[in-house]
Image (cartoon, helix red, strand yellow):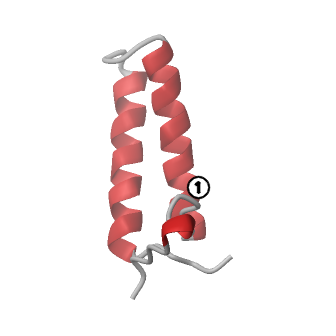
Amino acid sequence: MTKNMGSLDKTVRLIAAVVLIALAATGTISGAFAIAAYVVAAIFVVTSFVSVCPAYLPFGINTRK
């Protein structure tokens, strides 16, 4: 797969993942919302490290310079 995420995009996703994990871990959100927050955070972390967002591919979006 061709990398399609720039550094700003990756940074924003990692910050969002940390916030979601913190909200779930502290009990600010709970139940199904906490599980969903963990799942979304995991997706954000993985896509940030591999620099590929599968949702960008069908639309031809590329934030990488």
Q: Residue at x 36, y 67 (%)?
A: 9
Residue found at the far bottom of this picture: 65
- Viewport quadrant of the N terminus: bottom right
Residues packed near mark 1 inside 10 Å, few (<14), some (14 to 19) or many (20 plus): some
The reply, left or right, for residue 36 in relation to residue 16 is right
Identify the residue shown where x is 41% and y is 45%: 17
Q: Quadrant of the C terminus?
A: bottom left
The picture places residue 49, in percent across and down from the top left corner, at 56, 65
Which residue corresponds to mark 1?
46
Q: Residue at x 56, y 68 (%)?
A: 57
The quadrant holding residue 47 is bottom right
- x and y percent of residue 50 in the render? 60, 68
- Amino acid type, residue under disc 1 in the picture: Val
Q: How many marks?
A: 1
Where residue 15 sits in the image (x, y, percent)?
A: 34, 52
Give the residue displayed 33% in from the left and 39% down from the top: 19
Local secondary structure at mark 1? helix
Toward the top, the furthest residue is 31
